[in-house]
Amino acid sequence: MTDLTGAVWRKSTRSGGNGGNCVEVATNLPGVVAVRDSKDPTGPTLVLSHDAWRRMLSSAIDQAG
């Protein structure tokens, strides 16, 4: 299991300030990117390698475009 105690979480700039459906990402961890639901910060966290994170973002951009 990845130690997330040092994670610095950032909320998506597209989430706005309305407290809606937001994703937070921690990119300061060695070798991984962590993703969580901002409404449930103590809930489950998705931990991805940097390569997997890039592939996921690329896929999301392709789907949106």
Image (cartoon, rainbow, N blue to C red):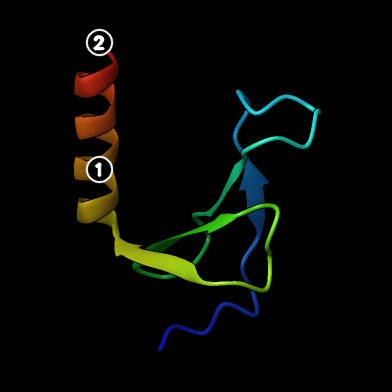
Numbered-mark total: 2
Q: Residue lying at the far top in this picture: please name it.
A: 65
Q: In the rendered structure, which disc, 2 or 1, sits on the residue that comes first in sequence?
A: 1
Q: Is residue 12 left or right of residue 39?
A: left
Contact check, label 2 and label 1, Cβ < 8 Å:
no
Residue 23 position within the rendered picture, expressed as x and y whole percent measured from the top left: 56, 45
The residue depicted at 60 percent of the width and 23 percent of the height is: 14
Quadrant placement of the C terminus: top left
Which residue appears farthest toward the bottom when viewing the image?
1
Say which residue label 1 marks.
Answer: 56
Q: Which residue is mark 2?
A: 65
Q: Residue at x 52, y 84 (%)?
A: 3
Instruction: Name the quarter where the N terminus is drawn.
Output: bottom left
Secondary structure state at the residue bearing disc 1: helix
* Front position in the image: 19 or 12: 19
The answer to whether residue 43 is above or below residue 37 is below
Residue 6: name its quadrant.
Answer: bottom right
Q: Amino acid at mark 1?
A: Met
Q: Tell me the kind of residue under disc 2.
A: Gly
Q: Give the structural element (helix, strand or loop) at label 2.
A: loop
Q: Which corner quadrant of the image does residue 39 belong to?
A: bottom right
Q: Residues within 10 Å of mark 2 (few under 14, many from 20)?
A: few
Instruction: Tell me which residue sits at (54%, 58%) in the image.
Output: 36
> What x and y, as percent, mark residue 30?
42, 70
Q: Is residue 46 left or right of residue 37?
A: left
